[in-house]
Image (tube, rainbow, N blue to C red):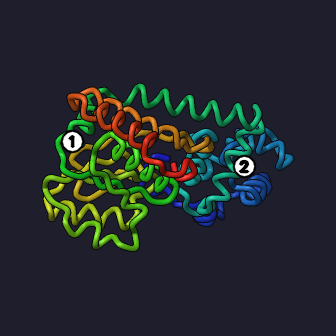
Amino acid sequence: MDRQDEVPQALGDLISRNSTRLTEADTRLLGVLMQDPVRAAMENGTAVSSRAGVHPASAVRLARRLGFKGYPEFRSFLQSNLIDGVGDFESPAARMAARLVRAEEGGLLSSVLDSEIAALEQVRNTVSDGNIRAFSQSLRDCRRVFILGRGHFAALSSLIALRLKRSGYDSVDLGSQMHQLPEALATLSPEDVVWFLAFRRAAPVVQEVRAIAAARGAKTLAVTDLKGARIDPAPDFQILVSRGDPGESQSLVVPMTIANAVILDLAAIDEGRSLRSLNEFRAFRADSGLSKALL
């Protein structure tokens, strides 16, 4: 559409605003779209028209009556709502259904692999070694590292904290200490670093911890996508990456790859600290006598 601020935030709103201009063919098309908005976001105009039993050009005419230049722009609007998780696409089940619809074209596993490969290629084109080095230098020079990820990224937060600990760095996984967050952050200082993982949107607790870090003078890092980028105040260093286009698998491999690159670069610049600590941990684990089930 010509003006972004005039775009309604759901398909239902769009129909209501233009109801007096709709034809019988439009009504049939909209019935199909409203019945399955997720599928509508993935199909082209010809496929939607076929399901509605109208002329293939009817979808284009509908899109123009609704204020779009053509059906591809209308579909982009639907996909944007899908990835934002608003209106007709606000549930995780709807987003998963959209990925299943996309997978029908070439097989489920192939669809997931294609999505992961495409997302990783975008990382190659958008993230530089300089971005990685800014993170690793911050970690090398700090006293402690606090990592915070919520939802799916709580698992990545835990993994980063574990790997840093084995590399000889005092790391705290805040995601596993939400019930003791005040105690964990009470001694936060300018010598510390807080590393955020925020995708789709920054959770309220991310904003709250960011405010505490700012008040305490701690350095902050963040790996986000565009939707999760609104952290205020802005982090000292931030890497923005896409985890996949609308209707594609939203990659967990992408942020994990960024984290792996940071930890590897850290080992390259910390004058052997990481390598010595890893060797010492390996020797301790072998000689500790602790049950293998615990390790």
Quarter of image, res 205:
bottom left
> Residue 177: horizontal and vertical position, in percent?
39, 66
Q: Is residue 4 visible?
A: yes
Amino acid type of the residue that numbered disc 1 sits on in the rendered structure: Ser
Whether the residues at callouts 1 and 2 have beta carbons within 8 Å, the answer is no
- SS label for mark 1: helix
- Which residue is nearer to you in this view: 203 or 169? 169
Q: Position of residue 246 (x, y in %)?
A: 58, 44
Compute the Cα span from label 1 to label 2: 45 Å
Image position, residue 270 (x, y; %): 22, 32
Q: Is residue 259 left or right of residue 53?
A: left
**Of the pair 34 and 215, the residue shown nearer to us:** 215
Image side of residue 16 versus residue 192, left or right:
right
Seen at 51% across and 33% down, the residue is 119
Residue linked to disc 2: 39
242 vs 208, nearest the viewer: 208
- Upstream in sequence: badge 1 or badge 2: 2
Q: What's the amino acid at mark 2? A: Arg
Residue 255 appears anywhere in the view: no
Percent coordinates x, y for residue 283 in the rendering: 39, 37
Circle 2: is it few (<14), some (14-19), or many (20+) Cα within 10 Å? many
Mark 1 residue crowding within 10 angstroms, few (<14) / some (14–19) / many (20+): many
Q: Residue at x 49, y 30 (%)?
A: 120
- Describe residue 101's horizontal placement relative to residue 275 as left or right: right
Q: Which residue is at 68% across, 41% downward? A: 60
Q: Residue at x 43, y 63 (%)?
A: 176
Residue that numbered label 1 is attached to? 138
Q: Is residue 8 above or below residue 193?
A: below
